Image (tube, rainbow, N blue to C red):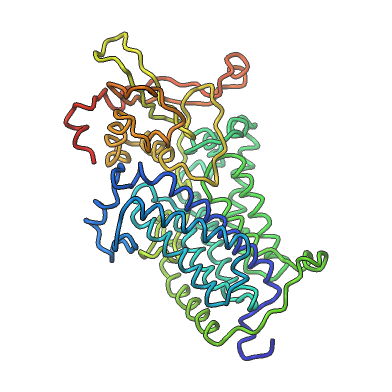
Amino acid sequence: MNTEWSWLGGPEYWLGRLVLERGIAAVYVIAFVGAARQFRALIGEHGMLPVPRYLRRHPFRLAPSIFHLHYSDRFFAGVCWLGAAVAAALVAGAGELVPLWAVMSIWLLLWVLYLSIVNVGQAWYSFGWESILLESGFLAVFLGNDRVAPPVLVMWLARWLLFRIEFGAGLIKLRGDPCWRNLTCLYYHHETQPMPGPLSWFFHHLPKPLHRIEAAGNHIAQLVVPFGLFAPQPIAGVAAAIIIVTQLWLVASGNFAWLNWLTIVLAAGAIDQSWLTGRFSGLAPPPMADAPVWFAVLVVMFAATVLVLSYWPIRNLASRRQRMNVSFNRLHLVNSYGAFGTVGRSRREVVIEGTAEAELTTRTIWREYEFKGKPGGVGRLPRQWAPYHLRLDWLMWFAALSPRYAQPWRMALLERLLRNDRDTLRLLRGNPFPDNPPRYVRALLYDYRFTTPAERRRDGAWWHRDLVGVYLPPVSADEPSVRRTP
């Protein structure tokens, strides 16, 4: 490569680009499939927070989305399945079979489709990993394919994104809950996190000195190690490997959708590839041409745009009032990230129950609705769902923290249970009223905690719970407050 644009391309980044592109595409598949399977009950035409109603109140400039042109549930489903199919093709390597302009257009299409979903998703799409996927997906537009050498500028912008994810998360902890500074947050976190996994009970019962080591290791991995990403190899690769190990630890200890997996993909793109490509002939980069002038210009323009937009996340990182998981533009480009600046000391859960009885008495038999991911029955071991995202389960955790989180949709949820709405019931683990809808539903608030090892041996239960009180009193389908829901 000896043209004036050769400094833009680095064949030694070929394997890193491959990992980035296939990994980002795989997460896109999961995100689009999850949207297709859950949207009808959440944001569909007859959902809890309908997209058509949202679009009437939010013009395109506030929520850029193709759904401003047209919305129907069938069209939304088509967008989701189209996105999943295109992303799956990229995972399979289709991006290497088309011209450079075509693969850029394909990545741009995926970004537009998912941005359109996120910008109308409202509370159900208010998580930081949505912005991470969109920012990563837009970055992938400029990665190219095997017809050109990987653009070095874009590969380094991927490290800049990874740095903001990790360093932002570390700073928000250090500035937030005092338990992070005294290394005691993990006394509680494994138990009180939004959606525990099958190993969370075991993590919670690790000796407290190990929890303190966990917390200290987290500070090192998020506040010190990320600076190594900008050092020469092999230091950058070692830093990336440390980040991968810590992210795998988080994968094992809980369910955080694709946050950890996308971070792992970004880190894997920064690992030194020379020792792999030198030992395995199948991993040697193919012959690659010089970058066309138009592609080089676009890469430079993209890098300059990221540089300008980085002002806002850098200012946020430097601020004592650092904000967590914030997008500074409607396109979700160059955002600020962070997680668990505050850790709960106790866990509360909203438990929804229904009854088929026409009259309520002290002897009324109530049956509990079980969710797929969030804790419910005390004898049920939490499951591993990540990288798949159970959106209703996650917002039920926020609803237990404060009723205001659920104010826009809680009555709509109950109304749909009162009529055995098929799409809503698909979001749950099962339906306790398979033959006829319940006459009344209610919501109770419980304190949950993991059982001790002794309680686990005695009762066979993973959780212990105590009733706190009534979260929502019994309602029937005949009540005006229920009939008014969308």
Q: Position of residue 381 (x, y in %)?
A: 56, 28
Q: Quadrant of the N terminus?
A: bottom right
Residue 452 appears in the figure: yes
Residue at horizontal 23 percent and vertical 27 percent from the top: 477
Q: Position of residue 150 (x, y in %)?
A: 63, 75
Compared to residue 370, the image places residue 266 above or below, namely below
- The answer to which of 470 and 3 lies nearer the viewer is 3
Compared to residue 271, the image places residue 478 above or below, namely above
Residue 228 appears in the figure: no
Residue at horizontal 39 percent and vertical 24 percent from the top: 434
Task: From the viewer's perspective, tell me whether residue 235 is left or right of residue 201.
Answer: right
Task: From the viewer's perspective, tell me whether residue 342 is left or right of residue 455.
Answer: left
Residue closest to the far left = 480
Q: Position of residue 75 (x, y in %)?
A: 36, 55
* Image quadrant where residue 436 sits: top left
Residue closest to the far top = 363
Q: Quadrant of the C terminus?
A: top left
Please tell me how many numbered marks the rendered image carries: 0
Task: From the viewer's perspective, tell me whether residue 11 is left or right of residue 412.
Answer: right
* Image quadrant where residue 187 sits: top right
- The answer to which of 169 and 245 lies nearer the viewer is 245
- The answer to which of 96 and 217 lies nearer the viewer is 96
Compared to residue 318, the image places residue 81 above or below, namely above
Residue at horizontal 61 percent and vertical 55 percent from the top: 264
